[in-house]
Structures are given as C-alpha cells and as structure tokens.
Amino acid sequence: MTAPLISTPVTLLAGPTASGKSRLALELAERTGAVIINADSQQLYADLRVLSARPSVEEEARAEHRLYGVADAADAWSVGRWSRAAAPVLEELAAAGRPALIVGGTGLYFTALTKGLADIPDVPLEVREAAGALYDTGGEAAFRARLGGVDAAAEARIEAGDRQRLTRAWAVAAHTGRALSDWTAETTPLLAPGSWTGWVIEPDRAALYASCDLRVARMVEAGALEEVRALTARGLDPNLPAMKAVGVREFAAHLAGETTLAAAVEATRQATRNYAKRQLTWFRNQTADWRRTG
C-alpha cells in the first residue's frame, strides 16, 4: 500500500484460531489503555459474530475495539480494503499518542502492516464475475493459458486449483490494464520500522485442537445455527469471503437436511482444526523473527 509510514507504538498479536488472542488482547488493553484493532478477516463481518468468535458486546465495552463487525456479508473485503480502513485508525491513534494493539489470525493483514501491500484499485463486481465465468466455462487449463498472456508471473506462482487467486489475477489485469504481479512489486509497509513489536501465540498443538473442538460446541450453544440460517436465507454468492467462513457450509448442509447436527458439528471441528494448522504453519514461516508465547 503506497502511503506515508505511520509511526506509533503498536503491538501486533497474531496466532491461530482458538488460541486465546482476543482474551489476551483484552487483558493487555485493560492494563495499558491500548485500542484493539481487528486483524481477522472473518471478524470484520457483522453477520458472523458467533462463527468468527468475535468479542462479545460485554467484552467490547471493556476496551475500545475497532474494525469489528463493520462489513456486510454481501461486501467482499480484501486485504487492501482492510489496510485502507486500518490506516486512518492508526493515524488517529498516533496523533493522540495512544497505543494500538492489532490482533487477529489473518496473516496477510500483518504482511501489509510490516512489509507492504500494493495499492491495487478495487475491481468492480461485474469484472470479477466475468473472470469467474471465463474460468468455469473453459476450465483451469484454458484459463491459465489466457492468464499467462497477461500475467505470466502470476500464472506460474499460483497453485493448481486455486480458482480464487487465478480469477483475481485475471480480473485485476482486465480492469487496470496492468498485471497483478506488477502491482504487487510496488509495496510500502503501513507501519514504520521500529514502531511495532510482533508477538505470535503458538500453543501446543494438542491443546489448540482441543480448544478448537470446545469452541465449536460453544458456538452451537451461542446460536451458530440461527446465524447460518439467517445468512443462507439471503441467497448470497457462495464465493463471497463471509460465505466461506468455517462453519457456514457445514451447518448449512444440516439446515438443508443433508446431514445430521452431529455430523455438521464434527465437520466444523475438523475444518477448524485444519484452519488452525494452516495458520500455525503460515506464522512459523512468515514471522519467524517475532516473539513467541504459548
């Protein structure tokens, strides 16, 4: 993201789902007066309070929280859009001399903060839909051949079967007339070097998986089925980020009579554990020099 570097005391607190990030962040904020800023792509959505384990109303009242529940499920937020929303918050806190505590599990948000993100223009919905239709009609091989003609670097970099990233690369090139790879080569970190401290919560894997299972049980008790029922009733595009949240597909299958509640719960537990594992791997690879806590 091309913008002036923001220099303010910032603590970055990252980690996998169900690792206790929100609880620790709240404890730190109450001790230090820091403002908690969300860096979790699912907790952005107002429709996903239960499934994303967003802080409760009571927890949000104990310390100032920003960028929680600010998006509608029909609105696809990207890492670029999150960065553009976070920047003025950080600027405001810097001007007031207030500390910021950025907490979440979406790795690319932390990359944007510390390493930079290209300021790619938002791609209109009709262009994104056209890219998806082109992919679905011709298949991946043909789509890759087309993409290679406008962004060979992206075509070579994106793994097989990754429809979302392939169509994203095509849509950016179609809309801007410039390859996504060229956009991403121009990066500026949002936070100034030396202005932040990074921590990763890295629990024992067995304990983390047990926490994941417990979280799913609590979600059901807290109204996860009602949340999914309301979400699916809107008839939204299944490719929207909110519709891909862990638990939406699994509980929707139960609500449609395709599976039992017990099977849906177990499928959600497995999906949650898989997601936590991917997050652990990402943070170990991408934030190796950050401090660790269990």
Image (tube, helix red, strand yellow):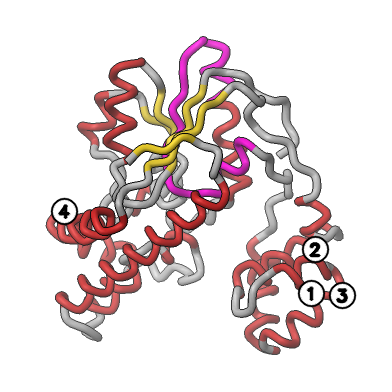
Q: Name the residue under label 3.
A: 149
Q: Which of pointers 4 and 3 indicates the residue nearer the eye?
A: 3
Q: In this view, does 113 lie above or below 92?
A: below
| Amino acid type of the residue that numbered disc 1 sits on in the rendered structure | Leu
Whole-angstrom CA distance, mark 3 to mark 1, is 5 Å
Whole-angstrom CA distance, mark 4 to mark 1, is 44 Å
Whole-angstrom CA distance, mark 4 to mark 3, is 49 Å
Q: Name the residue under label 4.
A: 222
Whole-angstrom CA distance, mark 2 to mark 3, is 10 Å
Query: Do the numbered discs 3 and 1 sit on residues whose CB atoms are within 8 Å?
Result: yes
Query: Do the numbered discs 2 and 1 sit on residues whose CB atoms are within 8 Å?
Result: yes
Q: Name the residue under label 1.
A: 147
Q: In which quarter of the image is residue 176?
A: bottom right
Residue for point 26% across, 59% down:
206
The secondary structure type at the circle numbered 2 is helix
Whole-angstrom CA distance, mark 4 to mark 2, is 43 Å
Local crowd at mark 1 within 10 Å, few (<14), some, or many (≥20)?
many
Indicate left or right for 21 with 156 as reference.
left
| Amino acid type of the residue that numbered disc 3 sits on in the rendered structure | Gly
Residue for point 32% across, 64% down:
273
Local crowd at mark 3 within 10 Å, few (<14), some, or many (≥20)?
few
The secondary structure type at the circle numbered 1 is helix
Q: Quadrant of the C terminus?
A: top left
Looking at the rendering, the stretch of residues picked out in magenta corresponds to: 90-114
Q: In this view, does 195 lie above or below 223?
A: above
Residue for point 75% across, 61% down:
172
Quick one: label 2 or label 1, which is nearer the N terminus? Answer: 1
Q: Can you give x and y, in whole percent of width and height, for residue 222 in the image?
A: 16, 53
Q: In which quarter of the image is residue 180?
A: bottom right
Q: In this view, does 73 lie above or below 11?
A: below
Residue 173, numbered circle: 2
Front residue of 237/293: it is 293
